[in-house]
Amino acid sequence: ETGVTQSPTHLIKTRGQQVTLRCSSQSGHNTVSWYQQALGQGPQFIFQYYREEENGRGNFPPRFSGLQFPNYSSELNVNALELDDSALYLCASSLAISNEQYFGPGTRLTVT
Amino acid sequence: GQQLNQSPQSMFIQEGEDVSMNCTSSSIFNTWLWYKQEPGEGPVLLIALYKAGELTSNGRLTAQFGITRKDSFLNISASIPSDVGIYFCAGLRNYGQNFVFGPGTRLSVLP
């Protein structure tokens, strides 16, 4: 059974640019949640996708958007990058909404 | 902002000692999860709790769902160097909502 995978591992972008992060969910999982983790803090919920529909969103601006595909993989898109967007972005998948979440290794985004 | 509090914020212990940490909130939660995160990696699920009063073990780790449903506890017995990391609690208030994470407890184990 393959776990949650994320790509790329690291990314450096310039302020104002756009970025797309990718996540493949664990086999059999139809729900994907995205989190932002700043240094020294706990993960902050961005949004969740369940069967290709957004199911809940945290306190993040609209320039954070996402997609879930028929195979339940997912993308996180961030437009107009700001310096404060520098963080570890984590993807977690689960069998269904409100089930235990299993995390990928994360994508470290640095905005300069 | 964070709805969960974790204490202690950090702790330094000797190898072989037992460890206790907790997660508290002013709100009632229906599910508690405990994770461990090591540098440069994603959090790894350790234990899941679903009922008030529930006590669940995973090897040397034991977690409890507080009877008030506003807190949860994690104990590690006979700590070893590989226990080093940050331990996060995550709570789910109601079905259909999303998990909220605490700020973490950083554990250091001295040989």
Image (cartoon, coloured by chain):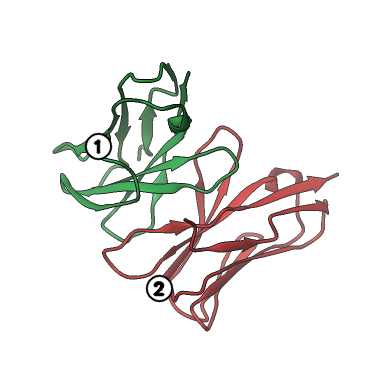
Chain colours: A green, B red
Residue type highlighted by circle 1: Ser
Across and down, in percent, residue A14 comes to 41, 16
Residue occupying the point 30% across, 63% down: B97
Q: Secondary structure at mark 2?
A: loop
User: What subunit carries mark 2?
Assistant: B
**Between B3 and B13, which is closer to the camera in this rendering?**
B3
Within 10 Å of disc 2 (Cα), the crowding (few <14, some 14-19, many 20+) is some
Within 10 Å of disc 1 (Cα), the crowding (few <14, some 14-19, many 20+) is some
Q: Is residue A7 above or below residue B79?
A: above
Residue A64 in the figure: left or right of residue B111? left
Across and down, in percent, residue B103 comes to 57, 53
Across and down, in percent, residue A100 comes to 38, 57
Residue occupying the point 27% across, 58% down: A97
User: What subunit carries mark 1?
Assistant: A
Residues indicated by labels 2 and 1 sit on the same polypeptide chain: no
Q: Is residue A108 above or below residue B106?
A: above
Tag 1 residue: A65
Q: Which mark identifies residue B30?
A: 2
**Between A96 and A21, which is closer to the camera in this rendering?**
A21
Q: Between marks 2 and 1, how big is the CA–CA gap?
A: 29 Å
